[in-house]
Image (spheres, rainbow, N blue to C red):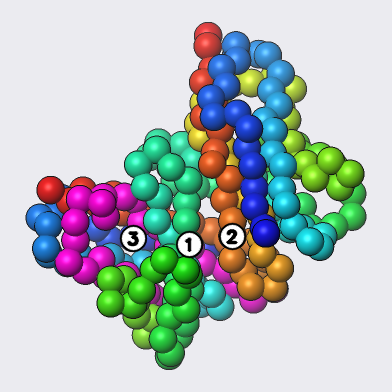
Amino acid sequence: AQSVTQPDIHITVSEGASLELRCNYSYGATPYLFWYVQSPGQGLQLLLKYFSGDTLVQGIKGFEAEFKRSQSSFNLRKPSVHWSDAAEYFCVLRSGGYNKLIFGAGTRLAVHP
Amino acid sequence: SAVISQKPSRDICQRGTSLTIQCQVDSQVTMMFWYRQQPGQSLTLIATANQGSEATYESGFVIDKFPISRPNLTFSTLTVSNMSPEDSSIYLCSVESRGSDEQYFGPGTRLTVT
């Protein structure tokens, strides 16, 4: 079965600290993976995507993610968090050729000053 | 990326009534989708809106409850019928263009059913 697991429901970090949000997926073939961010009043925004090739992908707002096939993981990282990064982050799996997106449960990030 | 608008942005409705949500895109897109986000939860795909034909519904969603129209390549509507408090959610449309492999989301419609 195709699924996405985000083990951490809430994460709190201090401003300026590094961040890693975990994501594990279950999929029978090479997955298409995304990270979206949902901020109050701003809707869902695509941060980055992985389809194939280089396993370290760069996104907007200084985010990056690393695809590890052996661990079925696609963790999101940022070296230095800003207060404006406080939001809900979703790891998303695209179901093959069907355009269907399967969302993880989300991780809510809080940033302390 | 496409610019997507939804109307209304929010509404409070009485149980037993219906609400139609509109999704408008500023360019022609291949695919349009409708998602539901229940309070404190993640997004779940309701259906794919097909232009000129019936929508394709996901398991657990039926046309009688969530009728969908897509008369052209830039517009779609989702109706939430015979509403109950359990239908209180954010409803979002998304779009994808051919060859893009990326979906972009509208701002959402926050529905409260009393």
Q: Residue furthest front?
A: A1
Within 10 Å of disc 1 (Cα), the crowding (few <14, some 14-19, many 20+) is many
Q: Nearer the viewer, residue B97 or B35?
A: B35
Within 10 Å of disc 2 (Cα), the crowding (few <14, some 14-19, many 20+) is many
Within 10 Å of disc 3 (Cα), the crowding (few <14, some 14-19, many 20+) is many
Report in which chain the residue with disc 2 lies: A
Does B97 appear in magenta? yes
Q: Residue at x 73, y 52 (%)?
A: A26
Give percent across and percent down for residue A47: 64, 44
Q: Residue at x 47, y 56 (%)?
A: B44
- Ranked by sequence position, the earlier of labels 3 and 1 is 3
Q: Quadrant of the N terminus of chain A?
A: bottom right
**Residue A85 quadrant:** top right
Instruction: Identify the element where label 1 is drawn.
Output: strand
Q: Amino acid at mark 3?
A: Gln
**Residue B14 quadrant:** bottom left
Report in which chain the residue with disc 3 lies: B
Give percent across and percent down for residue B24: 38, 68
Residue that mark 2 sits on: A101
The magenta-colored residue range is B73-99
Residue that mark 1 sits on: B45
Residue that mark 3 sits on: B6
Q: Residue at x 85, y 57 (%)?
A: A52
Tag 1 near tag 2, CB within 8 Å: yes
